Amino acid sequence: MNYYLGIDGGGTKTEAALVDETGRLVAQTLGKASNPLRSSFAHAFTAIDDVTARALAAAGIEATEVRGISAGLAGAGQPRVAKRVGAFLTTRFRDAEIETLMDLEIALETVSAEGAGVVVVAGTGSASFGRDGAGRTARAGGWGPWFSDEGSAFDIGRGALVVLARAHDAGAPPGAFETAVAASLGVEDWDEIVDLVLRRPLVRLPAVFPAVAEAADGGEEAARSVLDQAAESLARLAGVVIRSLELDHSEFALGRVGGIFGRSTYFDRQIEERLTRLAAGARLTAAKSSPAMAAAQRALRRGIAAG
């Protein structure tokens, strides 16, 4: 029996899915983040090694039985990142055909494995990626937290702190929203929030997102304003891709993938409303599988095509 491995690595977690030659899922594992641009290649390789080793162990197979790997990784849009990750995987899986892709490409596979499609991806970071009927692709966003990643968990956390900072500047007393944000970070007041976030912004700001999501669903207007802006930003990214691929008047699958979706009824409604207005032919499509499973199925298809 031959096996095929899919890897989905991002700034929050890494997931591996292992399928056999019939497409049956035999193991799925979850581990730490593996975006080398947010930490280091050493950390990324450790995370990838961990999830793949546990997948093999769960299936009771050896690395030599893996014939193909598709790895979708944050940061792999940069050739140097893709090359180094591919070289690392080759040392672990010498008998496998390996391809290293952007995590965005794998995310699109969960919505549309072939044909025209656009996906909005939002977790720790954010971006949109699409493909037209001829196979031409386009991307918007995903260039990092300091000048991109709009609408991401990082951006939402930053937006929440902007709201709180302005309230403090205006002399407003601490309210329920500040209390919720502080609790999400394990501190008690504004000064402690600032101190904690400034020391580790890449980690702490995304951690604020769940508090914002809960507050918005509870009717907190400040939280809703932050999520409204995030929804606008994500829809803008998708709009850029749609226009770049000239899909405005075509039928295509339009989906969303990532950790910030499904966490807030209010936010999901806002992003859905905005996405449906982008193009008349857009069909809102739910992800058919996890990105790791989509990557594994892609590796299997490549193996079958290669004979």
Image: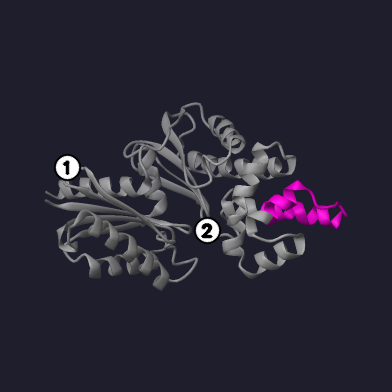
Q: Over which residues does the magenta segment extend?
A: 159-182
44 relative to 8, above or below: below
Q: Which residue is mark 2?
A: 143
x and y, in percent, of residue 141 in the image: 53, 52
Residue 184 colored in magenta in the image: no
Q: Secondary structure at mark 2?
A: loop
Residue at image point 63% right, 50% down: 156
Q: Is tag 1's residue or tag 2's residue first in the polypeptide sequence? A: 1
Residue at image point 86% right, 51% down: 172
Residue 82 image label: none
Q: Hey, which quadrant is residue 145 in on the image?
A: bottom right
Q: Which residue is mark 1?
A: 22
x and y, in percent, of residue 237 in the image: 54, 45
Residue at image point 64% right, 59% down: 185
Separation of marks 1 and 2 at Cα, in angstroms: 37 Å
Q: Secondary structure at mark 1?
A: loop
Q: Residue furthest top?
A: 280
256 relative to 30, above or below: above
x and y, in percent, of residue 214 in the image: 63, 42
Query: What's under tag 1, amino acid-wise?
Result: Thr
Question: Can residue 242 be spotted in the picture?
Answer: yes
* 305 or 94: nearer the viewer: 94
Query: What's under tag 2, amino acid-wise?
Result: Trp
